[in-house]
Structures are given as structure tokens and as C-alpha cells.
Amino acid sequence: MTLSDVLTIFRQDPAFMRCVTAWERIPARPARLTPWPAGLDLRLVAAAQERGIEQPYTHQAQAIGAALAGEHVVMATSTASGKTLAYNLPVLHALLNDPAACALYLFPTKALAHDQLANLQSFVSSLKPPIAVRPYDGDTPSSHRPAIRREARLLITNPDMLHTGILPHHTRWARLFASLRYVVLDELHTYRGIFGGHVANVLRRLRRVCRFYGSDPRFLCTSATIANPRELAEHLVEAPVTLVNDDGAPQGEKHFVLYNPPLVSPPFIPPNGGERGGGIRRSAALAAKDIAARFLQADVQTIVFARARLTTEVLLGYLRDSVAASGGDPQAVQGYRGGYLPNERRTIERGLREGEVRGVVATNALELGVDIGQLSGCVIAGYPGTIASTWQQAGRAGRRAGVSAAVLVASALPLDQYLVTHPRYFFGQPVEQALLDPDNLAVLANHLACAAFELPFERGESFGSSGDVGTMLDVMGEEGVLHCSNGRHTWIGEGYPAGGFSLRTSTPDNVVIQDVSDSSPTGRIAPRVIGQVDRPSAPVLLYEGAVYLHGGETYVVESLDWEEGLACVRAAELDYYTRASSTTNVRIVEEYPPPQS
């Protein structure tokens, strides 16, 4: 049975169609091809053609041409439209034609970086002379790092490692910074809000260090569909950026369905004629499970997105039970979320690419462009929060050919209900803008300290587009962390400031989860590490007595050692799970006098 057959069955099912508030068919789109840009190294053209790419898509050619002309570029085209090739080729062109040239690739997650590393190493393996492509992140063994600093010409890392592990030690990377020609920013749309403000300041520090070593790299950026890709790129790069958004890639036919689960209790009608109640709807998770199970029974490779880690694990259990009941292999359905170990996630990614994993239940950890192969079905259990994220998740199913389907299953939350009952708003509304504020004082002050640690500030020196920061530097001097003499501000504080804050969370460390089921008191059988969570999540997921779900398995938390960052869990056969109940209390700790008029 094909996906088209499943969609036909859905259309003929009155119970299903009663819950459908909109069914949009997006027609297939043919590819638009064009000759390779003039001046591109013929070795790269030959390498692309060896991989079956005879000609580039129009947007790829436009981006390559702009990069070769020395422009900053942002590409905002659809999922699987070949954006990676469009930035790889100009970078490799520079590295092939200048034996000293270097490049820096920044990915928002380590998983995405490792995925792109494998693809890039495969592409450059046939090039002569060879180009040293190296990863550098928190998983890189210390013994490998000196060789990477000496040899790497194309360094793959993430903003966090650039912030804490590279810029503060730039003298060890002098060769790279002196010859840096390109910086690639992938998944640009993730750099918004506080995280985006931090990354913008990390890039200010990067450009400042590059100027010190005499380089001026070009920035090549990619983004999912957002309302303001050029504006976002220019906020981050602080320079004019060329926008490439005329998508020339082919697209298969796509069906997008808005589904509102049925009422399980009738609306409340008060006897006195007061305001009518809305009734109770079936759980979005259960409805999503039923739809995904229909896809999987037809052997349609499917991804299910859930909004929370617990929902992901609960849905995984439901789906495995459903697959087993229909005679399928429950292990062909896997979970994927933050907290899984890196090797566990990569095994699942490989299983999806190779077709061994037929279904995956994930948080938005799989929303980014990790290569997971040719999925055809997508079920979104609850509105992700933005129209842009919804389309990004839906884009994980359906690549360049064939039919695909995405079903958004609404929860009972008011925003979900508004969207499914106003489908024209969802399909007609432009996607949201990505906003950031790099000059937020708290964020800016932290990065000014980092920048001063890296290089002294001269009198009148600006920091990106924030202008003269002399006043802030003077305040830091009064606090005793800068020494101000002859117009120069030099760091004299203890430690290094980049280690004092995280770009993403209030705490930089995690809580490790150990399974002690098979360990022995003598220590001969050591506990097994099964995952980790960030510290802010630990109190609601790993409190003593909590049921912790991981990869479809059930554990009971025996202890949480906050100081050591260690939670011990034991496997258990249970027919229930737990959910923390949180309460927020607000109290006045200090009052400030009102401003004088």
C-alpha cells in the first residue's frame, strides 16, 4: 500500500473527515537548472557531476556566483533544496586555489555538525590536493586538539565551542584566523531571541579577532523560511547581505491536513442559558498515534513530532504497542530527543537513512536539517508554537519527488483551536520574523568582558554596531576587572569570562542519568549511562520516585545528586508514568523608587 492509498482511505472515512478542518494539496514543482557559474574550479564541477549533479539549481548558481564575487550571502529556500552544496563549492574553490586559505563552519547543534562532516568528507575525498576537514567540539578528545589546530583548513564547530574553546585561546588558532576566508552559518533561523543575541556578540568577537590577524571573512548563511532572512543575517553579520530565495529545486506533491480531534464529552449547556462550555476533546497524542499507526501499517516511513520529552516517550510506547498488535516490529519505531546519548542519536539517524527505522517520534531536535533520508509521512502532535516551525517540521517529510503528507493534530489549547478553526489564517499568514537584540545590556556586558579578555580595547574602539562602549569599559575598570591606562583597557580579572555563562541556558552543565539495574554493590559491574538532561529540567524529570521514560523503556528514579550532577534510575515494569506538577510563587524582594517626572 502506498501513501496515496492511505490518503484515499482517509478521504473515504467519514469519522476522519469530520475532524478535518482543512486539506491543502500543494502541487509538485519541477526543477529549474542552469549552467555552472563562470570561474568555479573545474575540479569541483567534476566532483559534483561524479555524484550525479550535472547542473545546479538556479538558486544554487546564484548563491555560488555571489559568494565567488565576494558578497555575504543568505539562502532561504525549502528543505532539501541543496543549500549545502551552494556554500560548500565556493568555500572549497577558495581552499583549492589558495593553499593557506581556511574556513569555519558553524552549526547550531553537534548532531547537525557531525552529519554535515560526513557528507563533506565524502565530497572532498576525491579532490587534489587534499583538504583537511576537522570537527572541533566538546566531544573532541583532548589528545586530538593540538593536531586539529595545526592542520585544519576547514573547521566544523558550533557557536558554543567558538565562544568558550576557540576565541579565548585565539593565539593557538593564529594560522586559522589569519587566513580565514569564509564563515558558514547554517540554520540561521535558530539564532533568534536571547540565543541569537549571544551568537551575534560571539560573531562580533570573531570579526574583531579576525581584524587583529588581518583577515576579513565572507559569511555564507542558510535559513529555513522566515519572514526576514536578510534582516536577520544583517543583524548577525552587521554588513549588507545578498538574499537568495528564488527556489529552483524540485518538490513532490504534498498534502497538508489540519485535524481537530473529536469531542469525547458534549459541550456544556447551562440550564439558565449562560455561556456555553466547549466540551472535552480527545488527546492530541492519542489522535496522532492513530494517524501515524495508519501510515506505518502501510509501510510509509513516518516522523511524529511532539512538543515535550515526556510526550515523545509516551507516544513512542503507544506506537510500538500499535505496531506490535498489527504484526509489525516495534523496534522499527524509535524515539529521538534531547537527553539521548550522541551515539544513540546517530544510530537512529543512520537507521532512518537506510530504511531500517520506519518511524521516529521526536521533539524539535529533528526539526533541523540532519539527514534522515526520504520520509513520506509527518504527524505533528500539537502546534509547535510558530507557523515557521510548523512548516519546518512538515518539510521533514517529502523531498524532491513522490507524494508526501503532513498532518497537524490540534491539542485542546486555545492557540491550537484557533488555528484549526481558522485555516485561512494558517495557510494565508506569512511566517513569523526572527528577532534578536545583540545590544541587550546583560548580554552585551558579558561579551564585552570576553572580548577584553581576548584583546585589549583601544580608546574609542567600537564593538560591532553597538557604537562606542567606553562607558561600559570604564564601569568594568571600576569593578577591578579591567586596567585602564593610556587609553587602553586590558583584562586583569581572574579566570576567563567565557566560562562563566552559557549561550543557551542559565547553567552550562547537565545531569547524567545512570541505570543501576544491573550494577553490583562491589562495583564489579558498573552502572550504565543512558542519557543526560540539562540542570533546569532535572527537578521536573528526575526527582526521587519519578518515572523516567527513555527509548520506550521505563525507569524509576532512585536518587538525584544535585552537587554531583548524577541521577540513578532502575528499570521497572509499570503501567503508569508521572508528570511533575509545578507551582510558581512571586514575591517582592526589592522595591525601586518611581522615576522622577
Image (cartoon, grey):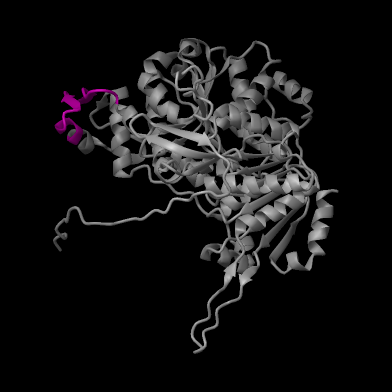
Please say whether residue 467 is visible from this viewpoint.
Answer: no
| Residue sitting nearer the eye, 79 or 489 | 79
- Quadrant assignment for the C terminus: bottom left
Tell me the quarter of the picture where residue 7 sits. Answer: bottom right
> Magenta stretch: residue 489 in it?
yes
Would residue 28 be found to the left or right of residue 551 on screen?
right
Would residue 98 be found to the left or right of residue 212 on screen?
right
| Residue sitting nearer the eye, 44 or 519 | 519
Above or below, 264 relative to 562: below
Tell me the quarter of the picture where residue 355 sits. Answer: top right
Residue at screen point 66% across, 55% down: 288
Q: Where residue 135 sits in the image (x, y, percent)?
A: 54, 21
Residue at the extreme front of the image, as rendered: 521
> Magenta stretch: residue 570 in it?
no
Above or below, 385 relative to 564: below
- The number of discs equals 0
Q: Which residues are magenta?
A: 475-496
| Residue sitting nearer the eye, 2 or 511 | 511
Q: Where residue 487 sits in the image (x, y, percent)?
A: 19, 26
Residue at screen point 58% across, 32% down: 112
Residue at screen point 21% across, 56% down: 588
Residue at the extreme bottom of the image, as rendered: 272
Please say whether residue 58 is visible from this viewpoint.
Answer: yes
Residue at screen point 62% across, 21% down: 92
